Image (cartoon, grey):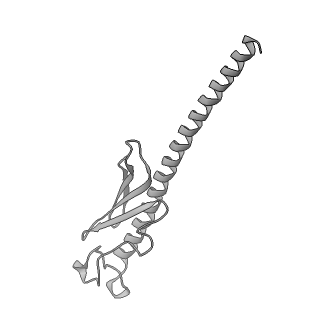
Amino acid sequence: MGQQQLLLIVLGVIIVGIAVVVGINLFNANATNANRDGVISDLNNLGAMAQQFYKKPVSMGGGGNSFTTSNGAAADWTIPTGLDSTANGTYTATPSPTTVTIVGLGTEPGEDGSPVQATATVTATTISVQVNN
């Protein structure tokens, strides 16, 4: 083979190598973003469930305008069994009479290398989600 053919082969291998590295990086970034979106979606769903509990009368198994037993509810609001851990991540709730804080820990690494994490603050009328990484 001539030098020109060897040079073209080497150049082709370098270009393919760069394309593979860029593809892997894009795939990882997409997986992180998809996991972050999934955690946020789960937090919004759990927040809606907490609001339902808050607004439902105690006589019907709700909180009677409280997320805790302060209004005579049988129990504090908790994450329903089976929803505390999903394919997107794991979730923990900390209720108080007027708010519930739900922390979601994703399954993919975030921008800083630790797992994706988001926190939802739920009140009687609002659900606000803050992404931590």
> Which residue ends up furthest to the top in the rendered image?
3
- Residue 80: % across, % down: 41, 74
Left or right of 17, for residue 35? left
> Which residue ends up furthest to the bottom in the rendered image?
59
In the figure, 12 relative to 103: above or below? above
* Residue beneath the point at 37% across and 76% down: 53
- Residue 94: % across, % down: 28, 66
* Residue beneath the point at 29% across and 84% down: 74
Tell me which corner region of the image, top left, top right, bottom left or bottom right, holds residue 45. bottom left
Tell me which corner region of the image, top left, top right, bottom left or bottom right, holds residue 7. top right
In the figure, 48 relative to 116: above or below? below
In the figure, 18 relative to 45: above or below? above
> Which residue ends up furthest to the front in the rendered image?
1
- Residue 66: % across, % down: 28, 74
- Residue 78: % across, % down: 34, 73
* Residue beneath the point at 71% across and 21% down: 9
Which of the two residues, 132 or 108, is positioned nearer the viewer here?
108
Quadrant position of the N terminus in the picture: top right
Q: How many marks?
A: 0
Left or right of 42, for residue 53? left
Tell me which corner region of the image, top left, top right, bottom left or bottom right, holds residue 75. bottom left
In the figure, 9 relative to 63: above or below? above
> Which residue ends up furthest to the left in the rendered image?
70
